[in-house]
Each structure stands twice: as structure tokens, then as C-alpha cells.
Amino acid sequence: MKDVFDFLSLPVMLIAVVICLLIFHPLYNLYLHPLRHYPGPRLYAAFHLPYAITYLRGRSNTVMHNLHERYGPVLRVAPNILSYTDPDAYRDIRGHRKQGNGQNPTDVEGFFFMQRQTLLGMDRDGHTRVRKVLAHGFGAKSLQEQEPVIRKHVDLFIRRLKDMTCQGRPGGTLDIVAWFNCVIFDLIGDLSFGEPLGCLENSRLHPWVQAVFDTTTMYGKRMMVKWYSPSPSLTAWIGWAVGLSAPHSKQQDFAAKQVEKRLAIEDSATRLDFVGAMHRAEGEGGLKKVSKEEIVYNMRLIMLAGSESTATALSATAFLLAAHPDVQRKLTKEVRSTFKREEDIDLWSARRPKYLGAVLNEAMRVLPPASLSMPRVCQDGGDTICGRWVPAGVTLEIWPVAMTHSSRNFAKPDEFVPERWMDDEERDPVFEKDKADALKPFSYGPRDCIGKSLANVEMRLILARMLWNFDISLADEKGKNWAKDMLGWNLWLKDPLNVVLTTPVRRGKE
Ligand code: HEM
């Protein structure tokens, strides 16, 4: 009898413990957890699962936006996760701190696929070391050297569009998302490795680019594995076993091969590109400041972060211009009257048109190109965020769409109105109270986007050249819903966007 009791007691006790945990843990989260006074749906506060399912479905931006509109600018979205739409959150969570004062580190686990050798995953010291070195590849001097490379790709892009469109064949349509991917991936590939990927030349995406997109739908699944894996050491193994690692390995192999090739180029050490900047830097005793392995990891990051986001911003802008002919007319007029000839449009002169800047800002507000919340973890000892104390270890998020579509931050938040970014006299007073600080597409603080100046000039140049040459319209009714309910994980899952490009009749005379 004793044996039977012993035999039963183990599973029974285990079940009892699991039941206790299942009941106790949510009750603890609701009534005893340090975040219990933060607003948010009780289901999300009690369990992690609703947040995880939202993530898995690629719906986080929309769901967080709706919850923020209901509950306010700070929200408990999971037992240990807070999300913010107060613009001060950028400063408080991600801002610069004096040496000696702690920073809220990036949530390395949250990035999962980003090994600790990349800027995104490195600790504060490693990040400062690599970022300082890499910054040389993004300075004004480098940009000057990079200008002919950029121009070459933009010229070819425009030529390809002309080949594809109504040069004698009116009505030809093209998927502009694919073409923006082609030019940007070629361009960043060239600035990174000294050779383009050949997308424009061959009129199709390089397999490596496809591997980047293949990670998108997998990202939610990878996060599920990370959250619910029985032990952190098993996470990578499970990911590999269920086939979630393949596209990442492909990218890593490609980056490694390209870096090898690039370092073999004769004038490797003097080139002012990204690999050159990292390879040149030497520290004490002639040792390289950035190891070869770190170069490979960071080049993979740059290829992804630098290309996809810029192509998304351009696609969103083209879509919004095509869907708002009045805005397009005004912008086209500005571009075609600012420059006398197409050859006058270059990286520097393209910074001049003001309305172009306003259109880009507004496009990045309506569809923020980076779709992730870029989580940070509240530092040891806790921190004050937007005037309230947060204990150490809490994950701190800013969902871009929730921030830029918040009715607390912008009037008519869902409308595309570039004038809100113009000087007072051109702006409707209804936008007077807009919080411009809520638009930070390139993030903020010591870990903000290192490529933001490059991205801005690239986008201005490409758009100015496009609008000099073409009028853009949507090819079909379906196009009107291109941005509606777009799913997003690490990247937005963008549908093709078919447009018609027509050569303007009175070019240069408006
Ligand atoms: C419209 C275009 C772009 C957008 C919207 C964008 C946005 C961002 C965002 C939101 C971050 C994350 C910052 C954080 O964790 O707080 C980031 C980081 C980064 N971006 Fe960009 N980016 C763009 C273009 C580029 C380009 C052109 C490059 C390089 C060629 C680049 C390279 C990087 C790198 C290396 C990081 C990591 C920086 C660090 O952790 O120090 N990005 N970007």
C-alpha cells in the first residue's frame, strides 16, 4: 500500500505543483507584482501568452496602438513588459547617460537572432568601441567618397525604370517595392563590400536578399521558441531542429565570404567604406580594435538594417504619393522648379527641397520603416521612466506605430499631411499641438541608427530623381490597401506595389 501511495504521490504532487503555479503565478502577477499598478488589460498583466500570440501573428504594432489609445501612454503589455507612447520615453529609456550612470541595456535575448558581436547586442563597452570605429565609415568625408558609388546605382535605377515603363509603351506597370529593394541592396552592398549584389544589373533580387525576407515570417516563431523553451541553452538547438536557423546561416555565410573578398582588395586599407573603417582601426600594441568575426557579424547587420528599412521608407513614400495626387503635385512642382537639370540633383543639392523633407517625415510617421519595439531592459537598481519608478529587469518597449499614431501625440494621426512638418505659415493651426518629438524613426540616444544621415540623403536623392522623371500612380484598386493591416515582425511583410510611371509632359516648366 505504501508503494502504491509512493507511486501515486510523485505525479500527483507534480500536478499539484503545476496547478498551484498556474493559479498562483497569474494571481501574483495581478496582485503582488511590482508592476501591478500599471494600466493595461488584466489578461495581458496576468499571462505572457496574449502578448506572445499577438507577436506571433505579426500584429503587435496594431494591437499595442489600440491598447494605448484605450489605456493611455504607459501600458503593461505582459507581466514584466511596459510599453510607452509618451515621447519622453525615448529620452528616459534610450537617452545618453553620463559615464558612471547606468544605461538601460538592449534586450539581447529579445533580439534573439542578433548575436552579441553585433552593435545591437553588444554591452556598453563593446558597443562604444565598435560604434566609434564604424562611425568613420558614416562621416562627411566618407560620404564624399561614396557619392560616385551612390550616384552610379541611382543612375542605373532610373535607367531601369525608364526601360520598364512607358517609353513608347504607355501603361506598363511595375512592382516598385522590388525595384527599391534592388537599388538599395545594391547600393549598400557596394558601400559595404566594394561590389553590388547585381540586383539592378540582372533585374532580380539576389538570393541573399530573399534570405533576409525569409526571416520575417519566421521571426515570431523564433521568439516563441525563445520565450517558451525549457532552458536558454536549448533555445538555439530547438530553433535549428525546427528549421528556423537556415536563412540566418545563409546570411552569415554570405557576409563571411564577402568580407573575405573585400579584405583581399589591394587598396583595402585606404577605402572609406564600412569594412575599411572597421579593419583599419588599430588599438594598443597594433591589435585590431574590431576582430574579423565582429566585422562579419556587423556587416550582416548593416546589410539588413541599412537596406530593408530604407527600401521600406521609399516604398511607403511612393505609395502615399500615388494615393495622394495633390501632395504629389505639390512635391513634383517643388522638385522640378528647384533644379534646372536632372544632373543638378546630387546628394547635397537634394537636401534643399523643404517639402521633400516634410513628405519623408510624414511617410515615416504614417508607416515607421522599423517595425520592432527595440526593447531595453530596465537597468540594475531600477530607473525613473516618464516620471514613474520602474524596477530593474522590466522590459521597456516603444512600438513605433503606437507612438506615431497616438491621438495624444498628433492631430488627425491616421491622415497623411506633410504640411504638419512645415513652417508655421504653411501649417494648419490644427497641427500646432503635434508633438514632433514623438517621431524618431531612427531611434534615439547612443544606440540610435548610425546610418541615419546616409539614409536621409539616399532617400532624398532617389525620390527627387524619380519625381524629376516620372509621375507615379497606382496601377490598380488593390494598391489602395497596400499599407492596410500590414503585418510586421523584425521587418514589415510588404506586398508588391504595382504602379504606373509616366513621363511628365511639361517637365522642368512647372
Ligand atoms: C530609413 C532608413 C533607416 C531606418 C528607419 C533605420 C532605423 C533604425 C533603428 C530604429 C535602429 C535601432 C536603434 C535602437 O536600437 O534604438 C537602427 C539601428 C541601426 N541602423 Fe538603421 N535605419 C535606417 C537606415 C540605416 C542605414 C542606411 C544603415 C547603414 C548603412 C543603418 C545601420 C544601422 C545600424 C548599424 C544600427 C545599429 C546601431 C547601434 O546599435 O549602435 N540603418 N536603425
Image (cartoon, grey):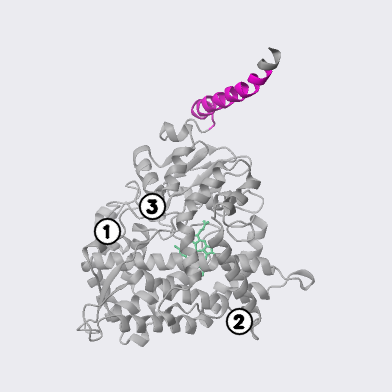
Alpha carbon separation for disc pair 1 and 2: 44 Å
Q: Secondary structure at mark 1?
A: helix
Q: Secondary structure at mark 2?
A: loop
In the rendered structure, which segment of residues is drawn in magenta? 6-34
Residue linked to disc 2 = 271
Label whose residue precedes the other's in the sequence (1 or 2): 2
In this view, 200 is above or below 326: below
Residue 352 seen in the figure:
no
Give the quadrant of the N terminus. Answer: top right
- The answer to whether residue 234 is magenta is no
Q: Quadrant of residue 294?
A: bottom right
Single out the mark in the foreground, 1 or 2. Answer: 1
Give percent across and percent down for residue 473: 24, 71
Type of residue at label 2? Arg
In this view, 3 is above or below 174: above
Residue linked to disc 3 = 401
